[in-house]
């Protein structure tokens, strides 16, 4: 069954510093997803810790918080049919060295920590992350091209 979903996508400080913001947005737009939220911010410790709370007992957690708060991120919300899975496929697996060429991590990342981008991994996570990073909600609009993107 197909379902319309909105997923939370975040270009991490390494992606912003490397000048990949435009390239990354283009990939999601070209695929046919609809951009419904976009903001740049330097995350506070509070929002970073909430976002990565699921990893708080992992050995890499404090380094992860230091990294994600080290500079600006670009927080985005993207909508489409099965957008969560579609976006994860565009992003590729966590370790850039193992990610296939053609994926964002496969094309731009060499590490597991500095892996350019985050994408929600399920419906509940997406809702939690969208509420966290877009507390005022996202934009309600229709992309005219969708009548050509979907059957
Ligand atoms: P993903 O971002 O692919 O969903 P994840 O949710 O398992 O991966 O982990 C969140 C982030 O934490 C990941 O993007 C990078 C960092 N991370 C995960 N495993 C790591 C490890 N073994 N060493 C260092 N950083 C790690
Ligand atoms: Mg994850």
Image (spheres, helix red, strand yellow):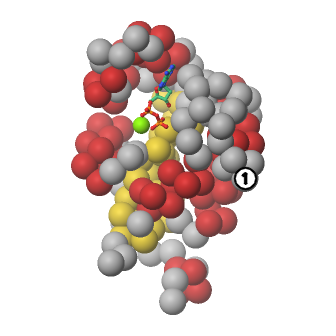
Q: Nearer the viewer, residue 144 or 68?
A: 68
Q: Where 82 sits versus 127, above or below? A: below
Q: Where 4 sits versus 28, above or below? A: below
Residue 147 vs residue 53: left or right?
A: right
User: Callout 1 environment at 10 Å: few (<14), some (14 to 19), or many (20+)?
Assistant: few
Residue at 28% over, 24% down: 53
Q: Where is residue 54 in the image (x, y as percent from the top left)?
A: 29, 28
- Kindly tell me whether residue 33 is visible in this rendering: yes
Residue at far front of view:
98
Give the quarter of the figure containing the N terminus: bottom left
Which residue in the protein does label 1 denote? 102
Residue 57 vs residue 31: left or right?
A: left
Q: Position of residue 47 (x, y in %)?
A: 33, 25
Residue 111 vs residue 7: left or right?
A: right
Q: Where is residue 15 in the image (x, y as percent from the top left)?
A: 65, 32
Residue at 41% over, 66% down: 82
Residue at 57% over, 80% down: 149
The part of the image, by quadrant, that contains residue 95 is top right
Q: Where 117 sits versus 38, above or below? A: above
Q: Position of residue 64 (x, y in %)?
A: 46, 17
Residue at 34% over, 30% down: 51
Q: For numbered disc 1, what is the local secondary structure? A: loop
The part of the image, by quadrant, that contains residue 57 is top left
């Amino acid at each position: 069954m197909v379902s319309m979903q909105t997923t939370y996508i975040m270009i991490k400080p390494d992606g912003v510093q490397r000048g990949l913001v435009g390239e990354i947005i283009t990939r999601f737009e070209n695929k046919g997803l609809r951009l419904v939220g976009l903001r740049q911010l330097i995350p506070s410790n509070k929002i970073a810790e909430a976002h990565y709370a699921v990893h708080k007992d992992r050995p890499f957690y404090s380094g992860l918080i230091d990294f994600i708060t080290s500079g600006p991120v670009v927080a985005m919300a993207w909508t489409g049919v099965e957008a969560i899975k579609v976006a994860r496929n565009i992003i590729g697996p966590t370790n850039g060295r193992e990610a296939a060429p053609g994926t964002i991590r496969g094309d731009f990342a060499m590490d597991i920590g500095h892996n350019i981008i985050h994408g929600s991994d399920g419906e509940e996570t997406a809702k939690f992350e969208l509420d966290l990073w877009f507390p005022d909600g996202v934009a309600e609009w229709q992309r005219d091209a969708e009548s050509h993107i979907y059957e």
